[in-house]
Image (cartoon, grey):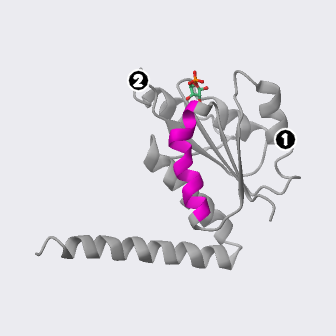
Amino acid sequence: MSAKVGVIMGSTSDWETMKHACELLDQLAIPYEKKVVSAHRTPDLMFEYAATAVERGLQVIIAGAGGAAHLPGMVASKTVLPVIGVPVKSSNLNGLDSLLSIVQMPGGVPVATMAIGKAGAINAALMAASIIGSTDKEVQSRLIAWREAMKQKVLDSSDSLGV
Ligand code: RP5
């Protein structure tokens, strides 16, 4: 099945974070592709990737980057697909730089910005599932089941406290 979600990241060093998005997409059986696309090191590839995303059948793009994290915003400027940005935790500023450079988009070019790091990567996949699930009832059912399982896990863990 062709990819519905494009998971891109600025460097292979982002994979430790972005793999959590891919794991969630696997769990929800949503087809995706993954690729290193850098706003600064491979700008031509970035433009081509974003400009051809619609015709290639992608429905959502998840873009993770750290530091001067221009990838999500620049990709959003070249596609009308929803772009979900994941700020990768940087070594110097703990990802605050990544967060601010992704979230502070000018009016007119939105990026749905997630939390810094692993939680952001997980939520990016869940957000992609929500978007795709709004028109794909099978994906929506799997998302509902995932939420139910999460709830049950919390209830079970609470029970294990014996209170
Ligand atoms: C960004 O620079 C990448 O997204 C990565 O988070 C950061 C550092 O990249 P490397 O120097 O580890 O390749 O473009």
Residue 53 shown in magenta: no
Give how far across and how far down residue 144 sits, in percent: 52, 76
Residue 25 shown in magenta: yes
Q: Which element type, helix, strand or loop, lies under badge 2? A: loop
What residue lies at 30% left-to-right and 70% top-to-bottom? 154
Q: In the image, is 56 to the left or to the right of 94?
A: right
Mark 2 vs ligand 1: CB under 8 Å?
no
What residue lies at 51% left-to-right and 42% top-to-bottom? 17
- Ligand 1, seen in the image, is in the quarter at top right
Q: Earlier in the sequence, mark 2 or mark 1?
A: 1
The kind of residue tagged 2 is Leu
What residue lies at 48% left-to-right and 47% top-to-bottom? 120
Q: Is residue 127 above or below residue 20?
A: below
Q: Would you say the magenta stretch is mainly helix, strand or loop?
A: helix
Give how far across and how far down residue 112 sits, in percent: 58, 48
Dot 1, how many residues are within 10 Å of its Cα: few (below 14), some (14-19), or many (20+)? some
Q: Which element type, helix, strand or loop, lies under badge 1? A: helix
Mark 2 → mark 1, Cα distance in angstroms: 32 Å
The kind of residue tagged 1 is Ala
The residue that mark 2 highlights is: 93
Q: Nearer the viewer, residue 111 or 146?
A: 146
Q: In the image, is 154 to the left or to the right of 74?
A: left
Given the current orientation, which residue lies at the most extreme right position?
Answer: 55
**Mark drawn on residue 51:** 1
Q: Report the magenta residues as a range.
A: 13-26
